Amino acid sequence: MEYWSMSVLSIVITVLIIYYLFRKFNFFKRHGIIHIPSIPILGAMAPVIFCRMSFVDFTRKIYNLNRDAKYIGLYATTKPVVMLRDVEVIKDVVKNFDTFINNPTFIDANDYVLSQSLFGLQNTKWQHVRKLLSPFFTSSNMKIMFTFMSKHAADFAKLMSTLPAYKRDINMKDIFDRYTNDVIALCTYGIKIDSIRDPTNKFYICGKDITYVSAIRSIKLIFIRAFPKLGRILNIKLFNNQKMKYFESRIKNEIAIRDAEHISRLDMIQLMLDNRGKEGRIQLDVDDIVAQAYAFYFAGFETSSSVMSFIMYQIVANPNIQIKLQQEIDELFNESDGNATYEAVNNKLKYLDAVIKEALRLFSPSVIERVCEKAYKLPPALPSEKSFTINKGMIIWIPLYAIHHDEKYYDNPEKFLPERFLNNDQDNNSSFYFPFGLGPRMCIGRRFGLLMIKVVLFHLLARCELKQCAKTSSIKFSEKTLVMMPKDGFWLNIQPYFNKKLLFNQKNVCKYIIYKYFIKKLISRILRIKIFSLFVYLLYQIYH
């Protein structure tokens, strides 16, 4: 009897598991929606999970499944997802922000920073925290941050321009990681770090680890998103506990010092600390502050350093662009004697601005996601089909990268053409250009990120020239991570760049060179002529 009871129980459990895993597998077929072929449990994600295809190539494959469809269905493991293709449909979704206000959440108590950061927060709490953090990115604060960035970027550029010959072949992603780490640590946390001269400092090592989306971490992320409750039961964590604890303790220690010694600094942590005790404002405890600080570090670290690297790669691949950039930068650098103001960098470097915008178009995030909060009706995907209603809890994908590479919206979309963002072309592109996302939930730190990129490129290209090296290779995205990362890195050769006008404006090295190689030799020659003339004169007097 006991045997039969166990057998029945096993069958019931098996049936329930099968029902749970397959209950939505025919969802798109039942609703007559064009969708990408899938397999049970893994859905359409099998090539990504088994590292056979990069995530960015995967999203483009879905996007191009049917060029006429306004949207396409897919199964992200067991969950049905709707990828929106039509820009007008996307605009309507953005207008209905209350229906698509939230990102997919991580129902995982083991990773507090994911669920309680600005990325994971929902509804009213997200709105309050967003409102709290927004003042950090005002123009007045950006001017203050510009001072910190400029000093750090100038020092960084000088160091790069004086590298010995045997160290000039560099993985640009690595050095930009270090630069970005230091700037974010200084501007956000008030912590001074020099990761170029001290490459093994613990803040950088731990920060790099907790932001790197490796193959294993990518699979964990997909699993937690597909089976959040099971992930919690199995205690699956995305982050290395020790390194995450170091990161948390460093921030908490900074907060404790400020509270104890009544220190106030101009950074994001201070903004959150100053809000404590104010009536009518959302109150963040120490753990909440750590979560927001981590979110900003995570968002800014990888994306900013990647964009910097992509730009360097493109200007090396297109030498005429590097020449134009350096001409523009030389003019401002000479005019300001290397100390350009916030207004000048933002308003006078038009071509640099276009280069950055084109890089953001060409290498934008793969997709952004939103969760439907209430039933929303979409128009027919194709003229011959019926409309479709997205139910509460379903996820939509907006494929930024694929849209930015669609020849329907951009001529020669695969080509790096900064000129498309000069003059009136910028207005023509605005309807389908969204590298920082869309609507009220777009990236809060976009102004900070753009400024950080612009400042370092200004100083670096004023002193250095980039060239190809033996390790330089074409960009092929890695299949082992969900983020856009080239397989072989961004290896380039960096050389000192001699600004001809600047040679005569500097008061230190250039004057020394002029004195040593021109004036000193001239004086020596004059002296030798005078001594010889005097000797001849004396001989003449003796014999006459």
Image (spheres, rainbow, N blue to C red):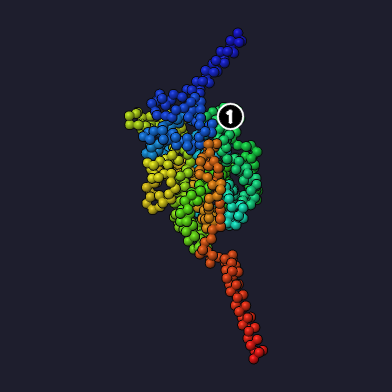
Which residue lies at the image location 51% right of the left edge and 48% below the top edge?
A: 313
The image position of residue 262, as x and y in percent, is 63, 51
Give the quadrant of the N terminus: top right
Callout 1: SS: helix
Give amino acid for label 1: Arg
- Residue receiving disc 1: 232
Which residue lies at the image location 64% right of the left edge and 48% below the top edge?
A: 199
- 372 and 34: which is toward the camera: 34
The image position of residue 70, as x and y in percent, is 38, 34
Q: Quadrant of residue 216?
A: top right
Which residue lies at the image location 47% right of the left edge and 35% below the top edge?
A: 58
The image position of residue 166, as x and y in percent, is 62, 53
Answer whether residue 139 is visible to the viewer in this image. Answer: no
| Residue lying furthest top | 1
| Rendered view: 18 above or below 212 | above
Q: Is residue 140 left or right of residue 182?
A: left
Q: Is residue 537 left or right of residue 128?
A: right
| Rendered view: 381 above or below 16 | below
Give the quadrant of the C terminus: bottom right
| Residue lying furthest front | 543
- 85 and 252: which is toward the camera: 85
| Residue lying furthest left | 384
- 8 and 364: which is toward the camera: 364
| Rendered view: 43 above or below 141 | above
Answer whether residue 21 is visible to the viewer in this image. Answer: yes
- 364 and 492: which is toward the camera: 492
Q: Is residue 418 left or right of residue 463?
A: left
Crowdedness near tag 1: few (<14), some (14–19) or many (≥20) residues, C-alpha within 10 Å: some
Q: Quadrant of residue 96?
A: top left
Q: Quadrant of residue 152?
A: bottom right
Which residue lies at the image location 55% right of the left edge and 42% below the top edge?
A: 488
